[in-house]
Amino acid sequence: MEFEILSNWYRRADVKFELIKQLYKREFALLVPSWIKDADIKKRSTRMLKVHNVGHLDFVLKALEFHEKKTPYNFYYSLAQYYDGIPNQDLNFTRRKENGINEDWKYRHETEMKGFDFLLDIDAGGHEDILFAYESAKLIKQFYDNNDCPYILRFSGKGFHFVIPYHYLPQFSLEGFQDKTQYMYYSMIAKRLYEKFSELIDLSIYDSRRVCKLSYSIANYEDNSYVAYPFGTNKEFEDFRLRDFEVSNFDKPIYRRGEHVFNMSMSPQKMLKKLEVEHG
Amino acid sequence: MAKKRTIAEYFDDADSDEDLDRISEALWSDSQGKIVDKDTFDLHFKDFVGDITPRQERFLKPAVFRKLKDKHPNISSRGLFKEAGGKDLSRDRKTTAKEVTTSEAEYKRKGAQRVDLQGYDTKGGKKVYNVVGRVKGKVVYGRKTTIVLRGKKVERIRDSKGRFISTKQRK
């Protein structure tokens, strides 16, 4: 894809406002896609960015010379939400290393964490298998709907993401190496869904520093680029066609759209009971 | 053709301390806290990471074990199962053990006759499941196999349980 399209996308005010909403008190990360092998570009991946408003976002992109260096970043946010967000950062990377804030945060972040969302990642592996990912998403969506489970559903660029916000779910220790942790619990739910519905579910994503692609950002792949987009209605999901999400064909609404929580006023208890994981 | 992703691919160049932290944490979650010694670590690591390169075997694996042991000093560096008189089950394709013990004492008390092992095939070479399909209302990974039908060799796709799968995409 022409970098100019990517660059223009992140200059759009409606896009920026939608991105910001998801970053409140979370970590923001700009990661170079794994298919890029050039070591010089790869090392530009940057985590631990604090972005709470549009001005912040512009400032970070400017500091990392996003538009000038033409780095095809994918935009991510942390599944963890912190009481006060992540520590303020220096964007001078030498100083950043010297002041040791991030090193300290590594040991402290779990105690600062308010909650951690449950992400179910259905990954097609390649775009030629996207309909299998869609079929998997359909099976899981039906299961969630039949059991009144609240969730957010997004197209992720090469698959689908189901996110259940943490406040709906039973809470366990957020410290990664305890005997009963939130991540173990999520891993258990994901394994049950894997056994029941689809082997396209990624089981290796349950750790406390996990980041997830931002809705309304562009997912860059070697062959094409797609808009990671949350579904707002059942009809929108039923009408899914990969080509509609290619950046060049994309004409769906963005302005003030947010993310729709399906079955918002319900509880996931019934679903957890069905999977026999209601108590972890 | 889609290939099932392995964590080894994600962390192909895992060298930073943070990457190692995250792998060991995700492994700990995946094992549901059942890693108690080097043997159980090996089993869960193999299961979690999938096919790893020799470099990763040499550097990544010991580094992840050290990280895990830092967090859980009770994890033994020894292979308790073998030391208790068992043979190395990872080399025995016929093993179908069903239980994981949670402590050193329990391990030895049970005579280390049973450990959790999914039974991967070390004699038959690696099985690569890289074709997506469906069987009985579930989306699965399968691999190409050849069967003989009325004297003719025909290609069919089977999943890890040996079931024939359909690879036709439908909306």
Image (cartoon, coloured by chain):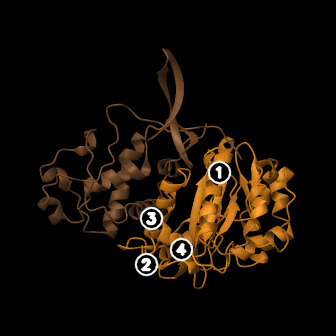
Quote the CA–CA distance across marks 1 and 4: 23 Å
Please provide percent x and percent y for residue A194. Answer: 50, 55
Residue A135, numbered circle:
1
Relative to A275, A244 lies left or right: right
Residue type highlighted by circle 4: Lys
Q: Disc 2 vs disc 1: Cβ atoms closer than 8 Å?
A: no
Look at discs 3 and 2 and give the one toward the viewer: 3
Q: Are marks 1 and 3 on the same chain?
A: yes
Residue A173, numbered circle:
2
Please provide percent x and percent y for residue A211. Answer: 59, 65
Q: Disc 3 vs disc 2: Cβ atoms closer than 8 Å?
A: no
Residue in front for this viewpoint, B136 or B101: B136
Number of numbered discs on residues? 4
A176 shown above or below B94: below
Relative to A279, B157 lies left or right: right
Q: Specify the quadrant that holds the C terminus of chain A.
A: bottom left
Is residue A70 among the parts visible in the rendering?
no
Relative to B73, B138 lies left or right: right
Palette colour of chain B: brown
A1 shown above or below A275: above
Task: State which chain disc 4 sits on.
Answer: A
Instruction: Give the residue at mark 3.
Output: A188
Tell me which chain appears orange. A
Secondary structure, mark 1, is helix
Secondary structure, mark 3, is helix
- Which residue is drawn at the image coordinates 59% and 40% (left, top)? B2
Task: State which chain disc 3 sits on.
Answer: A
